[in-house]
Image (spheres, rainbow, N blue to C red):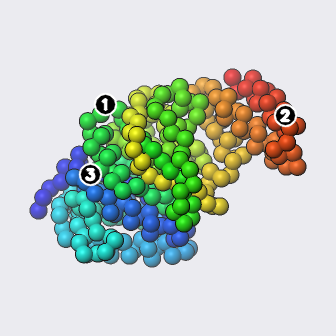
Amino acid sequence: MKQIETFEIISIVTPSYNQGEFLDRTLNSILTQSGPFYIDMVVMDGGSKDNSVSIITDYANLIHSGELSGEYNGLSFRTLKNQGNKNTNCLGISYRWVSEKDNGQTHAINKGWKLAVGSIIAWLNSDDVYHSNALEKAYKTLKDKKEIGLYGIGLHIDKEDRLMEFYPIEPYSFERLVDYCIICQPTVFLKSDVLESVGFLNEKLGYCMDYEYWLRIGKRNDFHFLPEVLACTRIHENTKTSQNLKVHSEIIQMQKKVVGKTSKHWLFHFANYSLADKFPRWKGKFPLKVMTRIYSLILGFLYR
């Protein structure tokens, strides 16, 4: 039996909680990736009450029924053929899962990363999907780069997988990253060395743990920008980032701690959402726009 080397493995962690509506599409987008590598799938479920565990176990049974293609430290990798839209197109898949109460999404990702065996790691939320050949593009690019990680082009899709818009991606610059989150989370792939040099995600954050992690990484190393579509972020009523006031409040406080300042962009948007929350009848009207400018200037003085 082939003994696999860690440089041949990509580890993908999927945190999930009550996302049965989308979970099959997420897991299938990982399973069907093609390329000269092995995929280490780790699903961390937070004790879902919907049909998520049924979907998770269906994938476990399917993958464990496949043909053995290699092993790494006792972890088996398998291939699937003649399974319709669930065939494997990489060298092999390993699949592990846990369903238990956790301390939220960030905690689940960190637990999954501690189990990961690949030289490249990532996480894909249970309502997002990878674009076809995303892992192959990331694998072939990142293994020859000095940068600690890469990101690509991301799309926003709705509940029915319809395209809404492109995520506002830009070529990498740490200065621009401070100004605005130019990195779309599901398009990010990292060398596993990052866990030693930078550490894990900050479990105290509930909304911007990904952005905070990019900033911590960016203070030490650069990202490589790959101008290819790699993933889709799903926007729906339960998406955490739809809670704009809480998100922006957390961001401005986080930036002050991590980079020592808060960008004007984030201050302005926090002021806008904060005032719109306090004066809902003025939303979109001239007085609110004037007040937003004044409030953001005051915040800029406080968060210098």
Q: Quadrant of the N terminus?
A: bottom left
Mark 3 residue type: Ile
Q: Secondary structure at mark 3?
A: strand
Q: Is 17 in front, or is 137?
A: 137
How far, Cα to Cα, is label 3 from label 1?
18 Å
Query: Which comes before the other along the chain, label 1 or label 2?
Result: 1
Q: Amino acid at mark 1?
A: Lys
Q: Nearer the viewer, mark 3 or mark 2?
A: 2
Which comes before the other along the chain, label 3 or label 2? 3
Q: Residues within 10 Å of mark 1 (few under 14, many from 20)?
A: few
**Residue that lies at the very extreme toward the left in this rendered image:** 1
Mark number, residue 104:
none
User: Left of 43 or right of it: where is 133?
Assistant: left
Q: Residue at x 86, y 38 (%)?
A: 286
Residue 44 appears in the rendering: no
Q: Quick one: quadrant of the C terminus?
A: top right
Residue 5 visible (yes or no): yes
- In the displayed structure, 115 sits above or below 208; it is below
- Against 148, residue 298 (above or below) is above
User: Which tag, 3 or 1, sits closer to the chain's start?
Assistant: 3
- Mark seen at residue 9: 3
- Please rate how many residues cluster around mark 3, counting C-alpha atoms within 10 Å: few if below 14, some from 14 to 19, many from 20: many
Of the two numbered discs 1 and 2 in the rendering, the one whose residue sits closer to the viewer: 2
Give the CA distance from mark 3 to mark 2. Answer: 52 Å
Q: Give percent across and percent down for residue 177.
A: 53, 32
Residue at the spot of label 1:
146
| Disc 2, SS | helix
Closer to the camera in the image, 28 or 71: 28
Residue closest to the eye, 192 or 69: 69
Instruction: Return the mark for residue 291.
Output: 2
Mark 2 residue type: Met
